Amino acid sequence: MKNLFLIVFLLCSMLSFSQRNVKDSTIGSPLIGVHYGGNWTAADLADRYGFMNHVGINAGYKTNKNWYCGVDANFMFGNQVRMTGIFDHLVDDKGNITDVNGDIAAVVVFPRGVSANVSFGKIFPVLSPNSNSGIFIHGGFGYLLHRLRIETNEQVVPQVELDYKKGYDRLTMGVNFHQFIGYSFLANSGAYNFYGGFYIQEGLTKNQRTIFFDQPNTPVSTATRLDIQYGFRLGWYIPFYKRQPKEYYFD
């Protein structure tokens, strides 16, 4: 993800800001940008995690009819884990988990995930300063993965190291659908181009592990899960306009 953001930054830095004035016409243009989303969880995902952050990049194309198609990639992270008792069987009679040296260890967990999507939508020039801005609606589909990140910092706890983490990480994958409604603003000139609005996604996912080490006698469900996230998304992007042809006059 760091490399992707670096690419976006370099592209934005190299962009010439002698953009065409979009005030008087609807212009087709490639768009590239970055976004942040804050999302609450619902349905099956709410049993595992709480609030999730989405940070991502997107690239797309807006036609001269204001139709939009694009792709985006997102890194998902948070610090609210609602599952309890995962490591209870590793706790000794004094209530501690010990590392390989017999010292008290700290095992911490965080929700993590990624998603990638294809989007299709349209901009409706309502309450807008020009015909390229307005109510922005899009939806689409893609891929979703989420899991539990397990950290022991600089300590070594053999029971949760290397491949043993797979018995606890709740790796889950599947298809993803999303919908967005908000507002898109393309400035008449300059780099003040942004969008924001309400975002919701629904993942139809399945557990990818065949056993959970904290529940070895309970079969892992193979049923399709409904993992819902809903909240807001704010983004900034840069349009790449073609240069206007120069006018030549001959005597």
Image: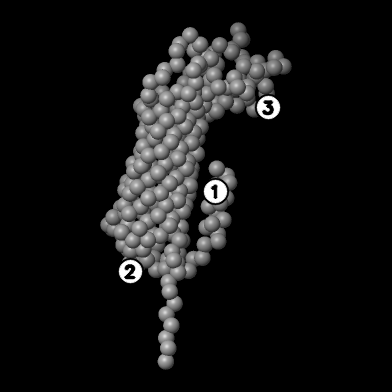
Q: Position of residue 107 (x, y in %)?
A: 59, 22
Residue at image point 48% right, 30% down: 146
Q: Which residue is mark 2?
A: 24
- Which amino acid lies under the numbered mark 3 shown in the image of this protein? Glu
Residue at image point 37% right, 61% down: 28
Q: Position of residue 51 (x, y in %)?
A: 44, 33
Foreground mark, 2 or 3, reads 2
Q: Quadrant of the C terminus?
A: bottom left
Q: Which residue is mark 3?
A: 154
Residue at image point 50% right, 28% down: 147
Element under label 3? loop
Residue at image point 51% right, 32% down: 112
Mark 2 and mark 1: Cα distance apart in space: 33 Å
- Which amino acid lies under the numbered mark 1 shown in the image of this protein? Phe
Density class for disc 2 (Cα within 10 Å; few <14, some 14-19, many ≥20) is: few
Sequence-first tag of 2 and 3 = 2
Foreground mark, 3 or 1, reads 1
Element under label 1? helix
Element under label 2? loop
Mark 2 and mark 3: Cα distance apart in space: 60 Å
Q: Residue furthest bottom?
A: 251
Q: Which residue is mark 1?
A: 5
